[in-house]
Amino acid sequence: MAEASGKKRSRDEEASGDGEGDCDGTQGLERSLIFNDTLIALRMMRAQFPKIEKVAQQPFILQSQLYSSIKDRTQVDRDLESLKKEKILRLFKLNTGQDDHAIMFFEDYINQMDIAVKKLGARSTHGIEVFEWFKNHVIECKLDVSIDHQELLILLSAGGEVQDEDITLLINAGLLTRQMIDPNMYWFAIPYIGSVLKGLSQ
């Protein structure tokens, strides 16, 4: 009788253990589905990005738009951080006077950068190599929305000798904007986004 009772307890414990495993698996699946929801929402919004005449603009999504489509903001923020670390997307602080960010898929940002470089290169070939340094040594390493002057110089110098004119070229191309509060800090920026934001708000 005791042996039967022991076997029953053993079976109960196994069932309980299996149940816990299923629970953990379900939670993992739920987390995965939430993560996918964030990425799916971003891809849908990217596909719906309007084409604006005479503006070569790769798609971007406003973070406020993403918040309005997914209820759990905390989870969205976690997902964005993970996607950023995996270099699937980048975030950019918008200079609109509101606390909002633009979200851009990494490949779209590289394409946008190439468009800006080609337009600038059509006017002058001087110092054009700094854009390759920026792409290979800065964008790949620095995933934040901003960078200080000294760190920018250090990262760029992995490509070659950096001159003040090189920083000016990056600013003129719309890839960096100097912060008003601290001139030694720069925001990473999306070229031509100002005119697009103005068009979207009208």
Image (cartoon, rainbow, N blue to C red):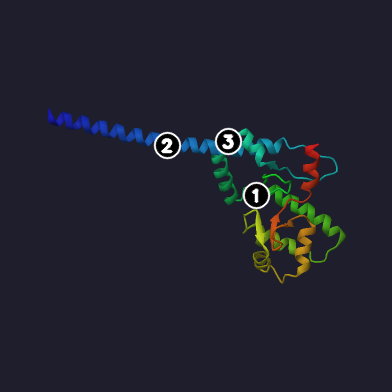
Q: Can you name the residue that lies furthest to the bottom here?
A: 161
Task: Tell me the tag on residue 104.
Answer: none
Whether residue 146 is visible, yes or no, is yes
Residue 139, given in percent of the width and then of the height, sits at 66, 57
Q: Where, by quadrant of the figure, is residue 131 drawn?
A: bottom right
Q: Residues within 10 Å of mark 3 (few under 14, many from 20)?
A: some
Label whose residue precedes the other's in the sequence (1 or 3): 3
| Inter-mark Cα distance, 1 to 2 | 30 Å
- The answer to whether 84 is drawn above or below residue 8 in the figure is below
Task: Tell me the tag on residue 90.
Answer: 1
Task: Tell me the tag on residue 25.
Answer: 2
The amino acid type of the residue labelled 1 equals: Arg
Locate residue 144 relative to residue 94 in the image: left or right: left
Q: Residues within 10 Å of mark 1 (few under 14, many from 20)?
A: many
Asked if disc 1 and disc 2 are in contact, CB closer than 8 Å, the reply is no
The amino acid type of the residue labelled 3 equals: Asp
Label whose residue precedes the other's in the sequence (2 or 3): 2
> Which residue lies under the disc numbered 3?
37
Q: Where, by quadrant of the figure, is residue 135 drawn?
A: bottom right
- Secondary structure at badge 2 equals helix
Locate residue 5 relative to residue 60 in the image: left or right: left
The amino acid type of the residue labelled 2 equals: Gly
Q: Residue at x 75, y 50 (%)?
A: 112
- Secondary structure at badge 1 equals strand
- Secondary structure at badge 3 equals helix
Taking depth in this image into account, of 141 and 96 the one nearest to the observer is: 96
- The answer to whether 31 is drawn above or below residue 175 in the figure is above
| Inter-mark Cα distance, 1 to 3 | 18 Å
Label whose residue precedes the other's in the sequence (1 or 2): 2
| Quadrant where the C terminus is found in the figure | top right
| Inter-mark Cα distance, 2 to 3 | 18 Å
